[in-house]
Image (spheres, rainbow, N blue to C red):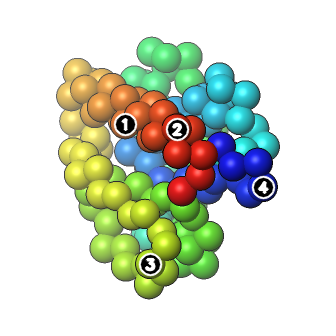
Amino acid sequence: MSDDLPVTLGFVCVQNAGRSQMATAFAERERDRRGLGDSVEIITGGTHPADSVHDEVVAVMQDHEIDLSDRVPREVSTTELESCDVVATMGCSTLELDAEEIDVRDWALTDPDGQDLDQVREIRNDIEQRVTDLFDEVHANGSQ
């Protein structure tokens, strides 16, 4: 990681009630595990936030002892996202950022809302691996 500036990672979807919440929780866990509290900032939000995190998402994250029951989806601003080094969209975003220096990645993940728990676990596992890979990449590159 850069010694000068923190790396800022953004996780965004429309409702901020499923995929981006899981990605954010895994990123927070990864940041803590790697001792990168001062080196990595995490932003999450949605373009049209839901009222609450999807029940099936809360349930499958409990498998990893991660409690999302108290999280509240929030709206994310373009200004916030333009402060990011990497923005991962979850496959549902209509996000358009003008800043060329932002690495925007569409993870193209299935929406867990209304899915059975086994399907949501598959989505969760995919997200967990993508977040770990992102931290490996950012760590290896020093900064984006």
In the depicted structure, whether residue 84 falls above or below residue 31: below
- The location of residue 18, given as percent across then percent down, is 40, 44
144 to 65, vertically: above or below = below
Q: In front here: 90 or 117?
A: 90
Binning the other alpha carbons within 10 Å of mark 4 as few (below 14), some (14 to 19) or many (20 upward) gives few
Residue topped by disc 4: 4
Q: Amino acid at mark 1?
A: Arg
Q: Going 21% across and 45% down the picture, which residue do you hit?
A: 110
Marks 4/2: CA distance?
A: 16 Å
Most foreground residue, 56 or 129:
129
User: Where the C terminus falls, by quadrant?
Assistant: bottom right
Give the mark toward the camera: 1 or 2: 2
> Is tag 1's residue or tag 2's residue first in the polypeptide sequence?
1
Amino acid type for the residue under numbered disc 2: Ala
Check disc 4 and report its element: helix, strand or loop. Answer: loop
According to the image, label 1 marks what residue? 130
Q: Amino acid at mark 4?
A: Asp
Q: Residue at coordinates 40% horizontally, 23% vertically from top-left?
A: 60
The amino acid at mark 3 is Glu
Q: Is residue 12 left or right of residue 107?
A: right
Looking at the image, which is closer to me, 39 or 47?
Answer: 39
Say whether marks 3 and 4 touch (CB < 8 Å).
no
Total of numbered circles in the picture? 4
- In the figure, 75 relative to 109: above or below? below
Sequence order check: which comes first, mark 4 or mark 2?
Answer: 4
Residue 140 tag number: 2
Mark 1 to mark 3 CA distance (whole Å): 23 Å
Determine which residue is flagged by label 3. 100
